[in-house]
Structures are given as C-alpha cells and as structure tokens.
Amino acid sequence: MPVPNSPLLRAVRMNDSERMICRDADQLAQAAARRISQWAAQSILERGQFTIALAGGSTPARTYRLLAHGVGETSIDWSKTWLFFGDERCVPREDDRSNYRMVRETLLSPASIAPDHVFPIPTLSSPGESAGDYAATLQQFFRTSASQLPVFDVILLGLGDDGHTASLFPHAAALDVVDVPVTNSPPGTLPPPVDRVTLTYPVLNSARHVMFLVSGESKAVALADVWSGHADAHDRPAAGVRPCGTLTWLVDQAAAPR
Ligand code: 6PG
C-alpha cells in the first residue's frame, strides 16, 4: 500500500504478519490512516458498519488527527463507524492521562463524531466494576452471549518500551485472563502509575484486523524481541497478539530493529 510521494522504506510479509517500516512518525501516521480508511470502507461495504477499538498512549494521535480531517484516501463514513477503546487509565475523562481525552481532542471533536457512536471505558467505579461494565457494553453492542467474543473489524495497538500492549503488562495476571473480554490491571512499571482497564487476549486475537503503531528508538529492543518470534508473551505481552485475522505492524525507522 504505497504512500504517495514518500515510498515506505520497506514492507515485508513475515509468516502471518505484514511489517511496514516507515521513514518517520509522519509517514507512519499517513500509512496508518490510509489503511484504516480502507478497512472501514471494506467493513461498511460488507457489513454495513465499521467497528474499531482505538489505542491509547501518544503514538496514535497523529493518525487520529489525519482521520479527523479525512482528506482523500483517509476519509471514513463516521455515520456507520462505532468507536471503542482497547484500554483506559482509571482516571477522570478530563485528566490529561486519559486515553479518552486524547482521542476526543485528536479525533472525536475535530471530526464531530456523534457521542452515541463512541463507547468510552467507564472509569468512575472500581477498576473491576469498570471492566465488567465495559464487557456488558460490548456484549450488548455485538449481541454476544457471555461465552461469545466480540469481533472488532479493527483493533489498533501500541507497544510499550517493555513490550506491553493495551494494558497487558509483563507478568501481569491480566495476561492469563481468557474467560472475559475485558479485565482490570494494576499499574505496570511504566508511567502513568494508575490502575487500568483493558481488552483481553481473546478479544484482541478475534479481530478481523489488528494493527500495531510503533514509533521511536525506545521501542526498538522490545520490538526486536517480539519480531524475533521467540519472545515469551509473559515477558513481552505484544508477542501474545496472534489474531485469527490479519496482523499489521507499522513502525518507523527509529523503532525498527537494525
Ligand atoms: C496506554 C496504551 C499503551 C500504549 C503504549 C505505547 O494506555 O498507555 O494503551 O498500550 O499504546 O504504552 O504508548 P506510546 O504510544 O505513548 O509510546
């Protein structure tokens, strides 16, 4: 999927994943926005709707801004799109650590997305109650029973310097939660040190498309471990993401293993 005027540095298919190495964070965001827009159009054509679980942190912000402005190949029919979250910090929505706040500022407000198309993870109850509430929200939207998994069209993920993804942290109990779609997790070792609510591996691995957005030299060691194919998911939780759908890695040159 070429990005006009600035070809990807390289794109390779490794086993069951596609790995695209971009020149920098801007090119990564452009490529991500185009790919998400393509998936959205395909989902809406095939199923009349597009469901996406958004990643938190800072890396996806550029991509969300591009999608909000929806120029050319990065436009999305928001009237048929339903937005969820892969994880959330247990802080108020106005807190600058909130993933919802980041998404609201970069995407929801600029694109004037209708609030009833957005499903934030609740954070006012205890982390465990918030996880249960969000699981119920997913069950209701996807019309699944307690024993069925919601199937997202797309799940976006980031990669922490320690190899975590969503809020699945190394050696955390959440890594072994496989009977519910959403769980809570105490803070990991990386900031911010707050309780989290996160989708669990079974949901991540049920998605039609999973795409990692990884930028910056601080990710290089963890990314190399995950790409090696030998990392234990308890040490590098991103290694446990092996979706039955497609797996795409969009990384910039700074993060790419040498
Ligand atoms: C979070 C994210 C987390 C994030 C990685 C990468 O809530 O922090 O869900 O998994 O994606 O930590 O974060 P950056 O994009 O800020 O490097």
Image (spheres, rainbow, N blue to C red):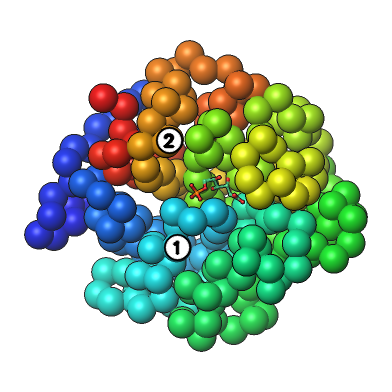
Residue at x-position 48% and y-position 72%: 106
Q: Nearer the viewer, residue 124 or 161?
A: 161
Q: Name the residue furthest top.
A: 230
Residue of label 2: 219
The count of marks equals 2
Dividing the picture into quarters, in which one does residue 40 lie? bottom left
The furthest residue to the left: 5
Query: Does residue 137 appear left or right of residue 117 in this picture?
Result: right
Q: Is residue 244 visible?
A: no
Badge number at residue 25: none
Say left or right for 110 vs 146: left
Q: Quadrant of the C terminus?
A: top left
Q: Position of residue 189 (x, y in %)?
A: 67, 35
Q: Earlier in the sequence, mark 1 or mark 2?
A: 1
Q: Is mark 2 within 8 Å of ligand 1?
A: yes
Callout 2 secondary element: helix
> For the residue marked with disc 2, what is the amino acid?
Lys
How many other residues sit within 10 Å of disc 2, few (<14), some (14-19) or many (≥20)? Answer: many
Q: Give the x, y percent position of residue 198.
A: 70, 47
Q: Quadrant of residue 102?
A: bottom right
Residue at which label 1 appears:
61
Secondary structure state at the residue bearing disc 1 = helix
Observer-nearest residue: 178 or 67? 67
Relative vertical location of residue 6 with respect to residue 165 in this rendering, above or below: below
Residue 139 position (above or below residue 93): above
